[in-house]
Amino acid sequence: MKIHAQALLFDNDGTLVSSLDSVHRCWTRWAAEHGITAEEFARVELHGRPAAEIAADLLPADVVPRAVARIETLEVEDVPNGGVHLLPGTKDLLDALPADRWAVVTSASRRLAEARLDAVGILPKTLVAADDVTRGKPDPEPYLLAARALGVDPAHCVVFEDAPAGLAAGRAAGMTTVALTTTHRADELDADLVVADLSALSALVTDAGVEIFVRG
């Protein structure tokens, strides 16, 4: 299978990197600090959603801004503890792409996203973070903003995601979607293509754009 694109848009956590250990440590501590029971916490979807939305599901509105600042601090401070690592195929695929052909589109804050990306040596020219949008995934705004920043028609963009909310955002933006089964089962992911991780893919850059191939 081959997919043609003008730009590739990557989610970060669960797509380029894994920070699951760090997320578990920090959010567990955060929940305990805010008196949230394990049962209450288990009912909330964490992955692929902005921290502000998660906090709003669990806490009164007047507490949310302070609570969001706290989880951001916990997660940024935890980065040096080794809770972030590259997922298979990330380096090879990004190294094959010109800087103006790809972007990172994340539900994390810019401060946290930059800390995690810097820890693994990824320096995107274009980064769209939670701070940059008024509506996070599954709304298409983050991906549409990334396409605009790269100067590419959304219809010519490919989104790489591991979470249902992110894939929904990509579809709503009118983009081709590629799902990675790094955090969810294949049957939970609605996408144009489903692969295990980025190591299943290779890229060929031409004057006409980027060709994405599934490795045989």
Image (cartoon, rainbow, N blue to C red):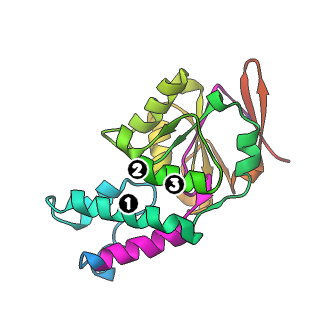
Residue 216 visible within the image: yes
Q: Are marks 3 and 1 in contact (CB under 8 Å)?
A: no
Q: Are marks 2 and 3 in contact (CB under 8 Å)?
A: no
Between residues 156 and 14, which one lies in front from this camera angle? 14
Q: Is residue 35 left or right of residue 92?
A: left
Name the residue at the top extreme.
207
Badge 2 local density, few (<14 within 10 Å), some, or many (20+)? many
Count of numbered tags: 3
Q: Up-down: is 190 above or below 41?
A: above
Picture coordinates of residue 82, whole percent (x, y): 60, 69
Q: Amino acid at mark 2?
A: Ser
Look at 64% across and 55% down and name the residue there: 120
Picture coordinates of residue 162, whole percent (x, y): 56, 54
Between residues 112 and 181, which one lies in front from this camera angle? 112
Q: Is residue 40 left or right of residue 154?
A: left
Look at 58% across and 52% down and name the residue there: 118
> Which secondary structure lies at badge 1?
helix
Disc 2 marks which residue? 109
Q: Up-down: is 113 above or below 210?
A: below
> Which secondary structure lies at badge 2?
loop
Q: Amino acid at mark 3?
A: Ala
Ranked by sequence position, the earlier of labels 2 and 3 is 2
Picture coordinates of residue 200, whole percent (x, y): 76, 51
Q: Are marks 1 and 2 in contact (CB under 8 Å)?
A: yes
Picture coordinates of residue 209, whole percent (x, y): 71, 23
Disc 3 marks which residue? 115
Between residues 169 and 84, which one lies in front from this camera angle? 84
Q: Which residues are magenta?
A: 3-32
Look at 54% across and 32% down and name the residue there: 175
Q: Amino acid at mark 1?
A: Glu
